[in-house]
Image (cartoon, rainbow, N blue to C red):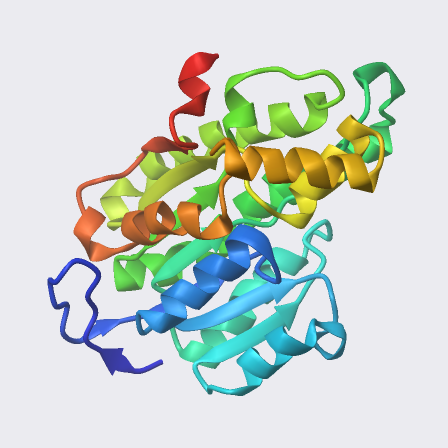
Amino acid sequence: MVLKSYSIYGNDWVGHMTAALVTGSTSGIGLATARKLNALGYDVTLHGRTPRTKLDEDLQSWLDSSPSRDYVQADLSEEHAPRTLVEATLARWDGLDLLVSNAAVTLHKESSDTSASEWDYLYQVNVRAAFLLGQAARDALAESRGSAVFVSSTNALKVNRKNLAYDSSKAALNHLARGMALEWRELGIRVNVVMPGGTQSPMLKSWLVDFAGDETAANKVLRDGVKKNTIAAPEDIVGAIVFLGSPEAHWISGAVVPVDGGLSLEG
């Protein structure tokens, strides 16, 4: 980890030590966030379940083109994985300033058709892993007076058919993050939540295929949503994540911020 000047809105933070871990960052919001942070001067660790040698060629090339980028494979449903991921990040950059907990899975089933193992797996990734990541990163974030940003969803604000496990996990994540913000305030660690609405990603595509019936119909729904400004690009979400993780947001902690173009106001 190296010392850098840091600026988003014109304020220079000379000497700010910038290392970030972004989970679930091989596509979608996570990848867009990792790219933006790296462009701003962060050393960044990306994470995914896929072995590095099997990543998309463009992503592999991007990772290989700078020593300020690292990748760690981990299955966050495994209890030890979050700590292993944090430890690998600390070993690579000698510290941590920003944790972006973005990894998540979804499940499109009625509650009556959802097995206990399916429910447990989703909560292991969406909630328990976030808790364990924060727990493992706490001391490093306290040392750097850093922050954590948890990526939730506006689904936490409502209920949907065939989405109970995912929706409730995001509501739990919101409460978890606010509790961490309260507990860690005296350590100088800020914790905030960003709640995207529908955003172009493999996860949304999977949901739309189930909703619309097939991939052709899903692609049409996706195109129509983009045209009507009801579906965001990953880059539309990144600004809020980067801001909340930056020194400019030093007096913001415990916030749960919808980033959905105001669509959640319609209920």
Q: Position of residue 62 (x, y in %)?
A: 54, 79
**Residue at 45%, 53% in the rendered image:** 100
Q: Nearer the viewer, residue 131 or 24?
A: 24
Q: Position of residue 189 (x, y in %)?
A: 29, 49
The quadrant where residue 115 appears? top right
Extreme residue in the top direction? 267
Can residue 221 be seen by looking at this rendering?
yes
Extreme residue in the left direction? 11
Q: Is residue 22 above or below residue 170?
A: below
Q: Nearer the viewer, residue 117 or 210?
A: 210
On screen, residue 110 versus residue 195, left or right, reads right
**Residue at 61%, 74% in the rendered image:** 59
Give the mark count.
0
Q: Position of residue 58 (x, y in %)?
A: 62, 76
Q: Is residue 17 above or below residue 140?
A: below
**Residue at 53%, 77% in the rendered image:** 70
On screen, residue 61 versus residue 69, left or right, reads right
Q: Nearer the viewer, residue 63 or 266?
A: 266
Q: Position of residue 108 (x, y in %)?
A: 78, 29
**Residue at 80%, 31% in the rendered image:** 210
On screen, residue 88 versus residue 184, left or right, reads right
The quadrant where residue 128 appears? top right
| The N terminus lies in quadrant | bottom left
Can residue 105 be seen by looking at this rendering?
no
